[in-house]
């Protein structure tokens, strides 16, 4: 059976086990361990394909970036003001993002005749302890996009994410990437981060009059 370590500890135990009979030096073992960790990280990054899950009435639809593009096209939106950049004094700078319109995604997952204005979207982020909720009446007269990349033309290199898709935003005093999915608005609304949820992994659509009855939504939504 092939050796398939599940953690750094398992790798270390394995290397220590083979060390004695072959008289392998500690330095060589360390180099092997570093190589294994580097290779594993490279493979993990290469295999990562961002997806977002949309849930309505208990049914889930998982969408990759490629599926968003093929199903909804690539919509480019110019944001006149992004409150996520207030801390650096450039919130009023125009920024362009590419993605899919939230309203069009909702049309696909909600039944015909359903009134979007009667629902609330709960946005779940990478950090499972943080969720944001947005009353979908906010879409009336405004455009929200689930962005999967930003036009980074003219942005300084030290303000660009490692994947070259985003301008970094500030959260809790740290510079982070808002990707892989980020809610942006054509006309500024709400506050940051509540109205501009980032690093999205899931959107759950709930009847607005049911949100207060959902203990999970009450506990986690901001």
Image (cartoon, rainbow, N blue to C red):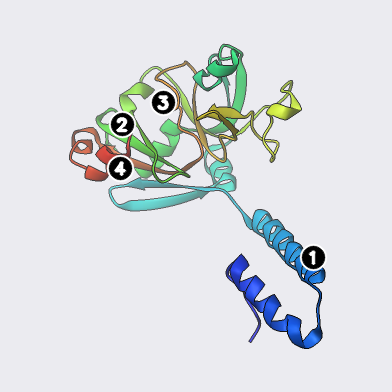
> Quick one: label 2, few (<14), some, or many (20+) residues within 10 Å?
many
Q: Which residue is mark 1?
A: 31
Residue at mark 2 to residue at mark 4: CA–CA distance: 10 Å
Residue at mark 4 to residue at mark 3: CA–CA distance: 25 Å
Which corner quadrant holds the C terminus?
top left
Which quarter of the picture shows residue 195?
top left
Residue at mark 2 to residue at mark 3: CA–CA distance: 17 Å
Residue at mark 1 to residue at mark 3: CA–CA distance: 47 Å
Residue at mark 2 to residue at mark 1: CA–CA distance: 57 Å
Q: Report helix, strand or loop for mark 4.
A: loop
Q: Which residue is mark 3?
A: 195
Residue at mark 1 to residue at mark 4: CA–CA distance: 57 Å
Instruction: Kindly identify the residue that appears in the image at 63 percent across and 76 percent down.
Output: 13
- Residue 159: x and y, percent? 68, 27
- Residue 140: x and y, percent? 35, 20
Q: Which residue is mark 4?
A: 111
Q: Nearer the viewer, mark 2 or mark 3?
A: 3
Between 207 and 19, the one lying in front of the other is 19
Query: In this picture, is 102 found above or below 89?
Result: below
Instruction: Kindly identify the residue that appears in the image at 46 percent across and 51 percent down.
Output: 62
Query: In this picture, is 146 found above or below 92?
Result: below
- Relative to residue 107, is residue 219 drawn left or right? left
Q: Between disc 2 and disc 4, whose residue precedes? A: 4
Q: Between disc 2 and disc 1, whose residue precedes? A: 1
**Mark 1 near mark 3, Cβ–Cβ under 8 Å?**
no
Which quarter of the picture shows residue 88?
top right
């Amino acid at each position: 059976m092939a050796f398939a370590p599940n953690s750094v500890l398992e790798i270390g135990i394995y290397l220590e086990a083979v060390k004695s009979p072959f008289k392998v030096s500690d330095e060589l073992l360390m180099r092997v361990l570093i190589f294994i960790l580097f290779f594993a990280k490279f493979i993990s990054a290469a295999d990562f394909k961002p997806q977002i899950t949309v849930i309505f009435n208990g049914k889930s639809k998982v969408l990759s970036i490629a599926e968003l593009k093929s199903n909804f096209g690539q919509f480019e939106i110019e944001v006149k003001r992004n409150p996520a950049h207030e801390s650096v004094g450039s919130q009023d700078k125009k920024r362009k993002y590419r993605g899919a319109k939230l309203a069009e995604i909702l049309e696909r997952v909600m039944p015909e005749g359903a009134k979007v204005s009667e629902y609330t979207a709960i946005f779940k982020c990478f950090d499972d302890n943080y969720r944001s909720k947005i009353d979908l009446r906010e879409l009336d007269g405004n455009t929200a996009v689930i962005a999967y990349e930003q036009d980074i033309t003219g942005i300084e290199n030290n303000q660009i994410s490692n994947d070259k898709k985003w301008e970094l935003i500030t959260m809790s005093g740290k510079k982070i990437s808002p990707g892989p999915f980020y809610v942006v608005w054509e006309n500024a609304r709400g506050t940051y981060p509540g109205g501009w949820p980032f690093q999205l992994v899931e959107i759950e659509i709930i009847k607005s009059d049911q949100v207060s009855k959902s203990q999970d939504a009450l506990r986690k939504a901001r």
